[in-house]
């Protein structure tokens, strides 16, 4: 199993992150913490063709969808926040192309409307975060341990990075399950989450203010 693309990370305090798709996982977003200062790699995830983007360092961003910002204190003591959760239709030039081709524009727009409605009422406070972390770690391990070259395996997420990504993973799992119950295909969508924090010169992501 190979990683699809590198996470491109700008200088602090703003770091942009993106993910691609993994054919054999249901849903997974990951931004790997560097090991020995190696650049981050994005674990490819397949939320049925869904590409999710995360943008850090945007504490002032407005929430287009969802009851946000959602705040919590991480195990490290960091003041973490999910600042925004938006969703748009995926582009044809992505791994979502097959799903896009199999649906009409009207169907995709209906899926988008349902996704936005779901996010607008999502109760982040109700998430069992320890359980979400365990679910993330299970999926993450399947991907990392499935890589054929041990030298290319990225380290597991830790600390604030782990907590943020596990919560985003849980939100996407719940949204996708909801859409599938409606007979819709979530892979035609591209959600984007904003969260506060930055990656220091030590390569560690930390929630901030």
Image (spheres, helix red, strand yellow):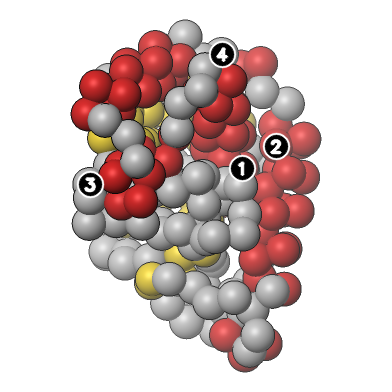
Which one is nearer the viewer's eye here, 133 or 177? 177
Q: Secondary structure at mark 1?
A: helix
Report the quarter where the N terminus lies: bottom right
Q: Quadrant of the C terminus?
A: top left
Residue in the image at 39% along x and 16% along y: 114
Residue 23 at least partly seen:
yes
Tell whether label 4 touches label 2 (CB within 8 Å): no
Q: x, y (%) of residue 105?
A: 22, 29
Residue under pointer 4: 123
Graded by Cα atoms within 10 Å as few (under 14), some (14 to 19) or many (20 or more), the crowding at tag 4 reads some
CA distance for labels 4 and 1: 15 Å
Gap between marks 1 and 3 measured at Cα: 25 Å
Given residues 160 and 104, the one toward you in this image is 104
Circle 2 residue = 132
Q: Secondary structure at mark 3?
A: loop
Residue that numbered label 3 is attached to: 91
Of the numbered discs 1 and 3, the one sitting upstream in the chain is: 3
Instruction: Determine crowd level at label 1: few under 14, some 14-19, many 20+ residues with C-alpha closer than 10 A.
Output: many
Q: Looking at the image, is mark 3 or mark 2 earlier in the sequence?
A: 3
**Could you tell me which secondary element the residue under label 2 belongs to?**
helix
- Marks 2/4: CA–CA distance: 14 Å
Instruction: Kindly identify the residue that appears in the image at 65 percent across and 66 percent down.
Output: 143
N-terminal of the pair, mark 2 or mark 1, is 2
- The answer to whether the residue labelled 2 contacts the one labelled 1, judged by CB atoms less than 8 Å apart, is yes
Residue mark closest to the camera, 4 vs 3: 3
């Amino acid at each position: 199993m190979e990683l699809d693309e590198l996470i491109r990370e700008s200088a602090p305090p703003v770091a942009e992150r993106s993910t691609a798709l993994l054919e054999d996982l249901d849903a997974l977003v990951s931004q790997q913490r560097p090991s020995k200062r190696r650049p981050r790699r994005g674990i490819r995830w397949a939320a049925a063709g869904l590409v999710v983007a995360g943008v850090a360092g945007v504490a002032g961003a407005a929430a287009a969808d969802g009851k946000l910002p959602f705040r919590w204190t991480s195990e490290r003591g960091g003041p973490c926040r999910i600042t925004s959760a938006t969703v748009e239709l995926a582009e044809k030039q992505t791994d979502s192309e097959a799903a896009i081709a199999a649906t009409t524009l009207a169907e995709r727009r209906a899926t988008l409307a349902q996704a936005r409605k779901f996010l607008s009422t999502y109760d982040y406070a109700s998430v069992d975060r320890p359980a979400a972390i365990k679910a993330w770690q299970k999926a993450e391990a399947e991907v990392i341990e499935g890589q054929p070259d041990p030298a290319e395996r990225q380290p597991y997420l830790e600390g604030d990075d782990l907590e943020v990504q596990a919560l985003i993973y849980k939100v996407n799992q719940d949204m996708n399950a909801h859409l599938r119950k409606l007979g819709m295909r979530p892979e035609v969508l591209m959600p984007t989450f904003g969260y506060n924090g930055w990656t220091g010169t030590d390569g560690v992501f930390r929630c901030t203010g």
